[in-house]
Image: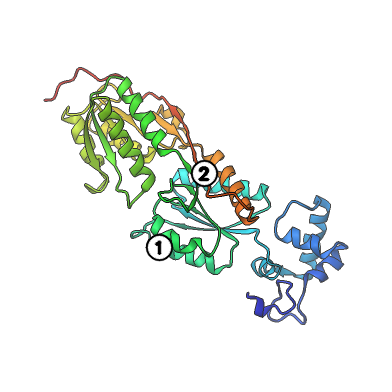
């Protein structure tokens, strides 16, 4: 519903067959509260008591009132609704981030309108999602995906406050609160090198497919090379299972004593294939992942790196609130949050097994 459809500026919607248009004033009168209180309740804000909240909802139910929240905010020039573009929510790392962003937004009296994109072609579907969110007249955008490039995001920046969540930013004028992927890659590589491994396969994701995983993989390679370790890169796109078969083959042939993966999901695929091939972990080969948010990862004993999802969500929402308030002199947001190593049972010293 647009402003033109709501000449009274209430942002209220009535059923097509209703004898008269119900407004927030009608609900306020029925509940015995102010129109401002009704508006706050309908927007999910916390600046009302539980008693007021119950009375407003009861009155709205009796009257059959249905609010148009986006139109209401547009009429009042409000900016409490934020668009969220999220990479595949089925991925545990993104699913947890979605939950944490929702909780942080609620605590800040902000409302998130979200879209999620799974399979994509060079970020085209994700860019289309940004356009759709913009069409909803949201007050700002949180972009929580590694599949949209800086070049694709730049045209939106002059129109609305935008902040990246999770993906490191490659320019100096796009706001971002990200995981410190360089710290992740370096920490994991040093752990593998400290265990004594000197021949390591690294599953590397292309930059255009996932920039965070690309940074992790390239950092692992650079760190290990600096420690004198021989590296065999395995491109994610080099096979029907994204590099898994190639990496496992290197291990079964005795050419590497460790396999480093850019995510825990890919680590699990490698572990399944190694088990099917009769290769012992970590007896014959060590395996690492990254993210550290899988349920039961501690029981599986995965060696991984825990990204600070909860902290990132809180910082992203706080920074967005600052951008919406247009506080002068804030500058470009550029935060990178380090996580922690989770030393599990999937990494041990290299075995004495020789190449057949």
Query: Where the N terminus falls, by quadrant?
Result: bottom right
Q: Residues within 10 Å of mark 2 (few under 14, many from 20)?
A: some
Q: Is residue 103 rendered to the left or right of residue 295?
A: right
Labelled disc at residue 125? 1
Q: Residue furthest left?
A: 356
Look at the image and tell me in which quarter the C terminus lies: top left
Rendering coords of residue 155 (x, y %): 45, 64
Q: Position of residue 18 (x, y in %)?
A: 74, 80
Q: Is residue 275 above or below residue 263?
A: above
Vertical arrangement, residue 114 with respect to residue 103, above or below: below
The quadrant in which residue 14 appears is bottom right
- Residue that sits furthest to the top in the current view: 352
Q: Are the residues flagged by discs 2 and 1 in contact, CB closer than 8 Å?
A: no
Q: Using the image as rendered, state which of residue 177 and residue 188 is in the foreground.
A: 177
Residue at screen point 45% across, 35% down: 292
Task: Please count the marks in the image.
Answer: 2
Q: Residue at x 53, y 49 (%)?
A: 98
Which residue is label 2 attached to? 96
Instruction: Please indicate whether residue 263 sits to the left or right of residue 35 in the image.
Output: left
Q: Nearer the viewer, residue 164 or 210?
A: 164
* Residue found 32% across the figure and 25% down from its top: 192
Q: Quadrant of residue 341?
A: top left
- In the image, residue 330 sits, relative to residue 17, either above or below, namely above
């Amino acid at each position: 519903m647009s402003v033109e459809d709501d000449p009274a500026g209430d942002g209220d919607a009535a059923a097509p067959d209703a004898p008269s248009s119900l407004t927030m004033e009608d609900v306020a009168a029925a509940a015995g509260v102010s129109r401002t209180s009704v508006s706050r309740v309908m927007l999910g804000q916390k600046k009302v008591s539980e008693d007021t909240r119950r009375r407003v909802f009861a009155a709205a139910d009796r009257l059959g009132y249905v609010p148009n929240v986006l139109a209401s905010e547009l009429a009042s020039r409000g900016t409490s609704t934020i668009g969220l573009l999220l990479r595949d929510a089925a991925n545990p790392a993104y699913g947890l981030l979605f939950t944490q962003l929702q909780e942080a937004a609620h605590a800040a009296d902000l409302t998130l309108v979200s879209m999620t994109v799974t399979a994509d072609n060079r970020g085209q579907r994700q860019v289309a999602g940004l356009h759709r969110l913009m069409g909803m007249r949201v007050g700002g955008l949180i972009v929580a995906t590694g599949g949209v490039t800086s070049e694709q995001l730049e045209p939106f920046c002059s129109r609305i406050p935008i902040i990246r969540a999770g993906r490191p930013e490659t320019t100096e004028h796009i706001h971002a609160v990200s995981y410190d992927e360089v710290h992740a890659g370096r920490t994991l590589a040093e752990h593998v090198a400290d265990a004594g491994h000197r021949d390591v396969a690294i599953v590397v994701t292309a930059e255009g497919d996932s920039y965070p995983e690309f940074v992790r993989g390239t950092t692992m390679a650079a760190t290990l090379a600096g420690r004198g370790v021989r590296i065999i890169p395995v491109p994610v796109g080099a096979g029907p299972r994204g590099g898994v078969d190639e990496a496992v083959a290197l291990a079964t042939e005795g050419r590497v004593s460790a396999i480093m993966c850019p995510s825990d999901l890919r680590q699990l695929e490698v572990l399944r294939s190694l088990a099917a091939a009769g290769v012992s972990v970590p007896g014959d080969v060590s395996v690492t992942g990254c993210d550290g948010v899988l349920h039961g990862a501690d029981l599986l004993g995965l060696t991984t790196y825990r990204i600070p999802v909860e902290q990132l969500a809180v910082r992203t929402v706080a920074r967005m609130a600052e951008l919406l308030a247009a506080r002068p002199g804030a500058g470009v947001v550029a935060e990178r949050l380090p996580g922690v190593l989770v030393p599990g049972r999937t990494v041990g010293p290299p075995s004495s097994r020789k190449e057949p």
